[in-house]
Image: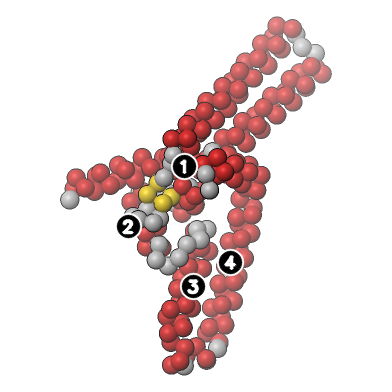
Amino acid sequence: MDDLTKIIIAILGGGILGQPLVHLIISYQKRKLKKVTDTLEANPLFEKYEAIDFKKDFVLPNLIENYFYSQTGISTNIKTIPKYIEFKNELGKHYTWKTIKEANNHLNISGEKIEVHLSKFQKSFMKITLVFSFTIFFLSLIGMVYLDYKYQASFSDKIVLLTLFIIIIVVCIFLVRGVSSIITANQMERAISKSRIKSTDES
């Protein structure tokens, strides 16, 4: 998946779907986890010797992965869960699982430690979007005040100006929200870099 595709998905996911869909999925996973746990506790088959390897190699890892997902919203395998925990501890107390999940698409989990991966294109796109959004917002605000003062706009004209200003605000919010995962990942990249440099100096 290229950078442009990731950005489009982030914009659509952040601007349109938002948090309700995420909460719905996590709620479903929690109910599923409880059902599986109850089944395991009630079924004596899993207590037999023949099922021990199955429990150890599949059931328990699956339960741990589902529990981790229900608590963090991050879907991963049992081998990378310790990496996520270590990564969160390195980031410090100001970062929560919700924050990490928001930037999860920009994390590289293939190495010994999780690294933040942002391309130059993504960083440039983020900066351009922020500058464009804030510039349009302030220019629209100044323009609305100027037109109202210069031409003594009537009540109906003020309603039109206000409506246009609200539309511009919504567009700006939509754009900023679309790159919010990149903004979060960029902040995390600086935080994790400082944390690891400090840890190296202390050792």
Image mark for residue 184? 1
Going from N to C along the chain, the mark reached first, 2 or 3, is 3
Element type where label 1 sits in the image: helix
- Spatial distance from mark 3 to mark 1, Cα to Cα? 29 Å
Residue 71 visible somewhere in the drawing = no
Please state the horizontal and vertical placement of residue 13, each as a whole percent of the image: 61, 46
- Position in image of residue 163 (x %, y %): 74, 26
Q: Nearer the viewer, residue 151 or 14?
A: 14
Mark drawn on residue 29? 4
Earlier residue among tags 3 and 1: 3
Q: Is residue 136 above or below residue 80?
A: above
Does dot 2 land on a helix, a strand or a loop? loop
CB contact under 8 Å: marks 2 and 4: no
**Residue beneath the point at 59% across and 71% down:** 32
Q: Which of labels 3 and 1 is toward the front? A: 3
Mark 2 or mark 4: name the one nearer the start of the chain.
Answer: 4
Q: Alpha-carbon neighbours of circle 2 within 10 Å: few (<14), some, or many (≥20)?
A: few
8, 22: nearer the viewer = 8
Is residue 203 placed above or below 120 in the rendered structure? below
Residue in view at x 32 percent, y 43 percent: 193
Give the amino acid type for the residue marked by disc 1 in the picture. Thr
* Mark 2 lies on residue: 112
Task: Pick whichever of labels 2 and 1 is earlier in the sequence.
Answer: 2
Q: Which residue is mark 3?
A: 62
